[in-house]
Amino acid sequence: MPGVESMSVAVMGFIVNGSGECKHANIRISLLGTGESPAAPVFVDGQKSKTLRGDNIVTEFEQIVQEYVVRRYGQATQEI
């Protein structure tokens, strides 16, 4: 997909670091620490898109990335 090689995706293991260290990523997700309820804020092009919660965070995040690629680069994606 032309242009997709310039896309950046950041997956941060700690929410405090996530906002500053990866603010220039096209898509970013920050996870909470052990023992906290599963919730992960997702930012797309610098704007908070949604907060993913529960046991399907990975699947939902993959879907967000795939939809972004289609919307931004205009071609169907292959499985991640």
Image (cartoon, rainbow, N blue to C red):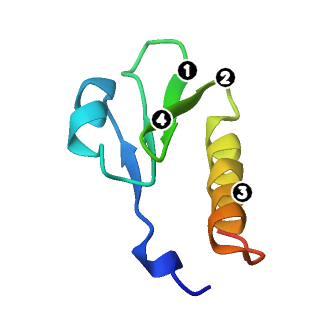
Select label 3 or label 1 by which is in front: 3
Q: Furthest-right residue in view? A: 76
Circles 2 and 4: CB atoms closer than 8 Å: no
Q: Residue at x 70, y 34 (%)?
A: 56
Residue corresponding to mark 1: 38
Tell me the tag on residue 67: 3
Identify the mark nearer the N-term, 4 or 1.
1
In-front residue for pair 58/28: 28
Q: Earlier in the sequence, mark 2 or mark 1?
A: 1
Residue of label 2: 54
- Residue drawn at x 40%, y 47% as measured from the top left: 11
Label 2 to label 1: alpha-carbon separation: 5 Å
Q: Residues within 10 Å of mark 3 (few under 14, many from 20)?
A: some
Residue 3 locus on image (x, y percent): 51, 81
Which residue occupies the foreground of this view, 36 or 67? Answer: 67
Mark 3 vs mark 1, CA separation in Å: 23 Å
Q: CA distance from mark 2 to mark 4?
A: 22 Å
Q: Nearer the viewer, residue 16 or 73?
A: 73
Judged from the image, the secondary structure of the residue bearing numbered disc 2 is loop
Residue positioned most to the top: 36
Check the image and report above or below for 29 versus 7. above
**Marks 3/2: CA distance?**
20 Å
**Type of amino acid at the residue the image marks with label 3:** Glu
Whole-percent x and y of residue 58?
62, 43
